[in-house]
Image: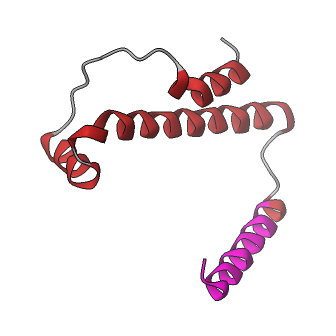
């Protein structure tokens, strides 16, 4: 399956047919999820977390593909991006976001 199809699959997973699966998790993690969302929303919470992880994995794939084709991002570009992001965060903080 291509990378773009994986992204589409992750975005549409909520509307897909639902099947029950068994997942092993530490008790403490199960307890934290239930405290946060209750038992009734446990599956939805875990599904959304897995979807976010797939999106992050797809971003990692895109970055690796870019680096393999063009080489590493120049440090100057990374520094400019970090500075711009910090300025945005400061602006949002001032505006109460």
Q: Is residue 73 left or right of residue 49?
A: right
Check the image and report above or below for 23 versus 51.
Answer: above
Q: Quadrant of residue 65?
A: top right
Task: Give the magenta-colored segment's residue range.
Answer: 78-97
x%, y% of residue 8?
Answer: 67, 24
**How many numbered circles does the render carry?**
0
Residue at 65% across, 88% down: 94
x%, y% of residue 49?
Answer: 43, 40
Q: Quadrant of residue 83?
A: bottom right
Name the outermost residue toward the right.
Answer: 70
Q: Quadrant of residue 63?
A: top right
Check the image and report above or below for 47 versus 18.
Answer: below
Residue at 60% across, 83% down: 96
Name the outermost residue toward the bottom.
Answer: 94
Q: Is residue 72 magenta?
A: no
Quadrant, the N terminus: top right
Name the outermost residue toward the top.
Answer: 1
Check the image and report above or below for 4 versus 82.
Answer: above
In depth, the one of 77 and 38 nearer the eye is: 38
Residue at 80% across, 50% down: 73
x%, y% of residue 14?
Answer: 51, 28
In terms of secondary structure, what is the magenta stretch mainly?
helix
């Amino acid at each position: 399956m291509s990378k773009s199809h994986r992204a589409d699959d992750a975005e549409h997973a909520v509307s897909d047919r639902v099947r029950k699966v068994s997942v092993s998790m530490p008790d403490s993690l199960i307890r934290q999820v239930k405290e946060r969302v209750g038992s009734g929303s446990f599956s939805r919470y875990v599904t959304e977390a897995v979807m976010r992880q797939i999106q992050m994995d797809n971003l990692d794939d895109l970055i690796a593909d870019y680096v393999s084709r063009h080489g590493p991002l120049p440090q100057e570009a990374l520094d400019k991006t970090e500075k711009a992001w910090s300025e945005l965060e400061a602006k949002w903080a001032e505006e109460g976001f």
